[in-house]
Amino acid sequence: MNPLSIDPKNLPLVNGEQFQGNLSQILLLVILLGTAAYLLLQHGLVKSKMMAWAGGGLFAFAALMAFMSIPMQVESVVRICFSILAVAGGVAFITAREPVHAALGFATTVLSACGVMFMQSAYFIAAATMIVYAGATIIIFLFVLMFAQKSNLQWYDVQLIRPVIAAAVATSLLFAIAWSVSEPGEILPIKLDLTRPYSLAAPGIAPGQALPPVPESTMSQAQLSEFVPAKTSGLGRSMFTDYLLAIELAGTVLLVATIGAIVLAQNPERDPS
Amino acid sequence: MNHSEVQNLLLLGGILFAIGLIGFLTRRSIILMFLSLETMLSGVSINLIAFSRFHQNYQGQILSVMVLTIAACEAAIALAMVVSLYRRKATLDVQAWDELSETILPKEPEGDYIGMEHLETYPKLSPAGLDPRDQPMPSSFQANPNQPTSELDHKTSPIVSEVNKRG
């Protein structure tokens, strides 16, 4: 049967066993994060590095306590370690005084996020993110920092714009996210989407031949239920069949951005005309 | 992939997004604001990949390819803009460009020419006097080598003080 024919409301709710009734844990996490952000983002940023490490360690410990009460496999432990590393890099990023240190914290965050993506078997995305963010973007940012950064710290590196309001806004946003995520039945377990059938069709169609009509014929129902989007070749097939127009438009946007960057970065005084 | 795993990943994406939001709202340096934007985008990307795994299709991964593309474009354009903004004001402070928002400008009186005082020109003085870097100096202007240096005050020698005044 077609999985899309299932009414999502009739599906048995996959309850979040671990997080059900654990709203207090989420609240604790959110409040800890908010207070840590408030403490770390005081006027003039971090006065002492000890405070930053204490806040980060406190939050990491709380997260570990929240997660370690669950019996876990090795994979989950590695994933959670990557997550904690990503969050720690983010904390180091927003609390660093030196912009170069902030860039290093950002690199830590992105690499740990790539590890998490890798464990979700999104290999191509992880590699591309590593190349684009941690490679190109960080290098370009460091070049611009070297170009524009004065040798000593400027006051705009240290001073913040309304840190209390920002911490409150971000914490309430995070609380809203955690609330809606932990709501049981909020995440619908819709399985394979067959509205984009071309990538599932049999390859090797001669020109002039009609497309194969039914994509379900290539995969049995048992295969469909066990399907894991782990193959890079499958991602490429889906990209260049189902989403061909979107990918071409993305390439066009890249071209336009390249031209715009070249035009914007020109020195107008050196213009020969 | 079970339900709690996708919950954890969504929470991680939300935390990264919130960290990026804090950085974007509080930081004043333009470069760090753009880095915060990239942090927010990586949180969104984790979110999409978790849903791609959970829903067993490639749509989330393709959306995250789009996010990656737009992030690369944004980094290129933003850094070009940072370079050209830095050329104008020689600062990375984002509040130096507050006047672009136009709300903080005082109300201008109609009919007055606002930029009048900037059009004033000042006369340029022609250089006069002696340049002490010129060698050799006339012997009459040279300090007496027998004189102790503590007494070689600028006030005592009118020529040296005159040269110092002119810069």
Image (cartoon, coloured by chain):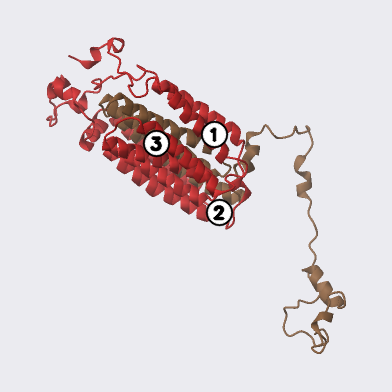
Residue matched to label 2: A149
> Residue A257: x and y, percent?
43, 41
Q: Alpha carbon of mark 3 to alpha carbon of mark 2: how far?
A: 38 Å
Q: CA distance from mark 1 to mark 3?
A: 18 Å
- 1 or 3: mark nearer the eye: 3
Q: Is residue A2 left or right of residue A171?
A: left
Q: Position of residue B28 (x, y in %)?
A: 58, 42
Provide the secondary structure element on which disc 3 rests.
helix
Secondary structure beneath disc 2? loop
Expressed as whole percent of the image width and height from the top left, the position of residue A183 reads: 39, 19
Categorize mark 3 by other alpha carbons within 10 Å: few (<14), some (14-19), many (20+). some
Q: Is residue A51 left or right of residue A179?
A: right
For the question of whether residue A93 can be seen, the reply is: no
Neighbor class of circle 1 (other Cα within 10 Å; few <14, some 14-19, many 20+) is some
**Image marks 3 and 2: residues in contact by CB distance under 8 Å:** no
Quarter residue A180 falls in? top left
Q: Disc 1 or 2, which lies upstream in sequence?
A: 1
Residue for badge 3: A64
Residue type of the residue flagged with mark 3: Leu
**How many numbered dots are placed on residues in this image?**
3
Q: Residue at x 79, y 36 (%)?
A: B112
Protein chain holding label 1: A
Please, what secondary structure does the residue beneath circle 1 have?
helix
Colour brown, chain:
B
**Residue, disc 1:** A35
In this view, the residue in front, B121 or A84, is A84
Q: Position of residue B148 (x, y in %)?
A: 81, 85
Q: Which mark is residue A121?
A: none
The amino acid beneath tag 1 is Thr
Q: Which chain is red?
A: A
